[in-house]
Image: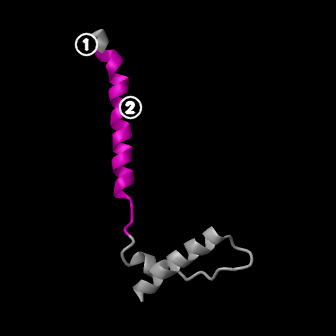
Amino acid sequence: MKTNDLKCWPTSVLCAVVLTILMLLNGCTIRLNGEFCDLYLPVYPDYEKDTPETIRQIDQNNIVYLKCL
C-alpha cells in the first residue's frame, strides 16, 4: 500500500458511515397516510392562555384530522 492510500482510508470509511446512516434514517420515516388519523386525538385550544401561533397549529392539525373522518 502506498502512504497516500493509508491517509485516504479514514476519510473513505467516515464518508461510507455517514452515507449509510443517512440511508437508514431515510428508510425509517413513517408516512402519515392513515396512521396520523389512527393515532391523533383532536386538541382543544385554551383561547385565553394559548398564543395565536399555538391556536393556529392546533387548528391546522385538527383540520387534517377532520379530513380523515
Q: Give the main secondary structure, helix, strand or loop, of the magenta stretch.
A: helix
Mark 2 in CB contact with mark 1 (< 8 angstroms) = no
- Which quadrant of the structure image shows residue 33? bottom left
Q: CA distance from mark 2 to mark 1?
A: 20 Å
Q: Label 2: which residue?
A: 14
- Which quadrant of the structure image shows residue 4? top left
| Residue 17 image point, x, y percent | 37, 38
Q: Residue at x 49, y 78 (%)?
A: 39
Q: Residue at x 31, y 10 (%)?
A: 3
The verdict on residue 11 being magenta is: yes
Q: Amino acid at mark 2?
A: Leu
The verdict on residue 19 being magenta is: yes
SS assignment at label 2: helix
Front residue of 28/55: it is: 55
| Residue 6 image point, x, y percent | 32, 16
| Residue 1 image point, x, y percent | 25, 13
Look at the image and tell me in which quarter the C terminus lies.
bottom left
- Mark carried by residue 1: 1
Mark 2 or 1: the one toward you: 2
| Residue 45 image point, x, y percent | 65, 80
- Which quadrant of the structure image shows residue 7? top left
User: Is 61 placed above or below 7 here?
Assistant: below
Q: Amino acid at mark 1?
A: Met
User: Is 30 placed above or below 37 here?
Assistant: above
Left or right of 17? Residue 56 is right
SS assignment at label 1: loop
User: Is 69 placed above or below 38 here?
Assistant: below
Front residue of 21/66: it is: 66
Give the magenta part as a residue range: 5-31
